[in-house]
Amino acid sequence: MISVAWIVFIGLILIGFPVAFALGGSSVIMLLIDSTNTNITIVQKMVNGLDSFTLLAIPFFMVAGALMTETSVGDKIFAFADTLVRQFDGGLAQVNIVASVITAGMSGTAVNDISSIGPIEVRAMEKAGFDRPFAGAITAASSALGPIIPPSVPLVLIGSIMGVSISRLLVGGLIPGIAMAIILMIYVAFISRKRHYPKKNAATFKEISISFVKAIPALLMPVILMTGFMSGFVTPTESACLAVLYAMFLGFIFYRNISFKRFWKCIADTAQLCSTTMLIIASAAVFGLVITQQQIPQRLASSLLALTNNYYIIVLMMMLIILILGCLLETTAIMIIMTPILMVIAQRIGMNLVQFGVLEALVVTIGLYTPPVGVGMFLTCKVCHIKTQSFLREIWPMVIMLLIAAMLVAFIPGLVTWLPDLVCR
């Protein structure tokens, strides 16, 4: 009977149904066949799926990111990053990556990073002599740092599904995020030498100091967030609320460049985006009931372990499953559907769940740039005015670089677990 639910789900996706309705529709069919009190069960599961204090962090992080974008701190971040690394091979491409590292500490999503400073970066790189498709591709690839470096909306979602410490997951993403940035910077240096892309003279100490002072208000955002949940003084959800208050302080009092009209627009846009995510979560809760009743996680784990008990092969197979789904589904749906299934396999092979959560978030993020569904791909092409074919030619090598980072996370547990073990209380 479970095959019927899966067939209906895939069929609805293929004919263009929104993911939330495809999940809900296939689940309803399965419950009608195999359950009693279906209406009550469905409503209860949808409500229970959203009845989580932890999930409140998602809309608050989204609002904070939107408000920081409205304050135009992207210009100041980009200027500060420029003084730090513009002298390296690749010049502004390296600046692009470093700026994304800083922005990642405020937004929590790749989409926010692309929309906030993406156009700024691409225009500056093209003016300096970079090809526009390359500029757009490195902007998209570096935005993958957003869901890994805390705060991270995907890690909050994955942690709430698995029932593990959100603080440990968020802190665990810091070193892998920096490793991703370093790998991308190495690739940029290589390709820039090959194509003779420009670089600038090193900034003076005075230039660095001035740009740093101007960027301090923006740089304080990740400091406030990290200090809060690393110390245990606040929960990640409370930390997200503090982020919103700080963003409001910058917009209304410090910079005074946000009107109440723009503020409510940020709230409305975030509510619209968040409502889609929450509807998927609610529908997936019912879908989760179906796969639990049919013991799909246990069956899949047993099937994989029957094929091989090699840790490395099983991890690669899990990554491949996520990558394939990334070509077909939206990232939120992948995490909600696959996390309960794959975490059972991860536990069977002895993988730390914090390590698994960061790995899943990283691999799912890569799916943002793969056709045909890649949201990050289409958003970058839209806001940066790039043809999709040209973008794809440039992004593939960078996707490989990100996969190398995923391999490091998969096979070096300490890369993820060392910092949470050291600082989280």
Image (cartoon, grey):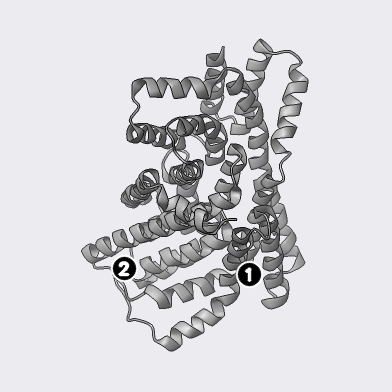
Give the answer, above or below, for where 148 lies relative to 105: above
Secondary structure of the residue carrying tag 1 is loop
Q: Label 1 to label 2, Cα distance in Å?
A: 28 Å
Q: Amino acid at mark 2?
A: Gly
Residue 146 in view here: no
Give the answer, above or below, for where 32 lies relative to 334: above
Name the foreground residue: 251 vs 150.
Answer: 150
**Residue shown at 60% from the left, 38% from the top:** 161
Residue 102 in view here: yes
Question: Could you tell me which quadrant the N terminus lies in?
Answer: top right
Q: Residues within 10 Å of mark 2 (few under 14, many from 20)?
A: many
Secondary structure of the residue carrying tag 2 is loop
Give the answer, above or below, for where 86 lies relative to 156: below
Q: Residues within 10 Å of mark 1 (few under 14, many from 20)?
A: many
Judging by the rendered image, the residue that carries numbered circle 1 is: 71
**Residue shown at 53% from the left, 21% from the top:** 296
Name the foreground residue: 41 vs 239.
Answer: 239
Judging by the rendered image, the residue that carries numbered circle 2 is: 90
Tell me residue 20's x, y (percent). Answer: 63, 32
The reply to whether the C-beta atoms of the residues labelled 1 and 2 are less than 8 Å apart is no
